[in-house]
Image (cartoon, grey):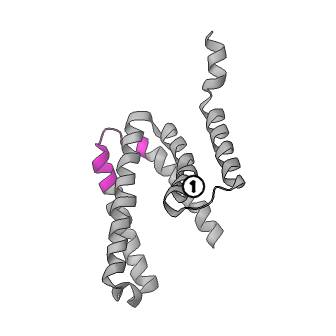
């Protein structure tokens, strides 16, 4: 089930970017608020059904962590994402998501004092190479001249 959930998440993430293209006429704040509100309305009942009493009896610090993650890491990220779609388009916004593992590695090194491993460097190189291939500017530069 886990692999199916990951595949479903990736598919719906891609569909969301395509669907968001049609919402360009709305301010990014409205689209982000609608997205987070709808997600909450779907996920909260599911959490209550699946976890029941553990959700209700959670400590205040747990609720604070959930609200903080929901606001800082989700709502603001969605606001930036939909703003990027409005300005640069869905394809370019999707390219930005490839940078997530790189930023996670850098923040892990700087904040958590993790060790820079060779596989991290190789992954970063592969991501940048993939972005260069997808973007295509390297090949278009030769055609323009």
Residue 2 lies in quadrant: bottom right
Which residue is pictured at 47% across the width and 40% down the height? 90
- Between 7 and 100, the one nearer to me in the picture: 100
Q: How would you rate the neighbour count of disc 1 (Cα within 10 Å): few for under 14, some for 14-19, many for 20 or more?
A: some
Picture mark count = 1
Residue 143: x %, y % from top left: 65, 14
Tag 1 residue:
105
Q: Residue at x 54, y 59 (%)?
A: 108
Q: Quadrant of residue 70?
A: bottom left
Q: Looking at the image, can residue 22 be seen?
A: no
Q: Is residue 69 visible?
A: yes
Q: Is residue 71 left or right of residue 50?
A: left
Q: Position of residue 139 (x, y in %)?
A: 66, 22
Q: Quadrant of residue 76?
A: bottom left
Query: What stretch of residues is rendered in magenta?
Result: 20-33
- Look at the image and say whether residue 71 sits in the magenta stretch: no
Q: Residue at x 31, y 38 (%)?
A: 25
Q: Position of residue 109 (x, y in %)?
A: 55, 57
Is 71 on the left or on the right of 106, as rendered?
left
Of residues 120 and 83, the one nearer the viewer is 120
In the rendered view of the protein, which quadrant contains the C terminus? top right
Q: Nearer the viewer, residue 26 or 115?
A: 115
Q: Residue at x 52, y 38 (%)?
A: 91
Up-down: is 32 above or below 61?
above
Give the percent coordinates (x, y) of residue 43. Answer: 41, 71
Which quadrant: the N terminus?
A: bottom right
Q: Look at the numbered disc 1 and give the secondary structure of its residue.
A: helix
């Amino acid at each position: 089930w886990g692999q199916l959930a990951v595949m479903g998440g990736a598919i719906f993430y891609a569909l969301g970017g395509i669907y968001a293209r049609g919402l360009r006429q709305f301010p990014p704040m409205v689209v982000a608020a609608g997205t987070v509100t709808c997600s909450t309305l779907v996920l909260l009942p599911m959490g209550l059904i699946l976890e029941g009493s553990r959700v209700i009896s959670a400590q205040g610090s747990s609720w604070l962590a959930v609200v903080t993650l929901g606001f800082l890491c989700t709502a603001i990220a969605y606001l930036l994402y939909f703003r990027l779609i409005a300005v640069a388009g869905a394809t370019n916004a999707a390219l930005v998501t490839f940078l997530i593992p790189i930023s996670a590695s850098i923040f892990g090194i700087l904040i958590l004092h993790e060790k820079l491993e060779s596989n991290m460097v190789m992954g970063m190189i592969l991501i940048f190479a993939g972005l260069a291939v997808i973007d295509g500017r390297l090949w278009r530069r030769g055609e323009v001249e």
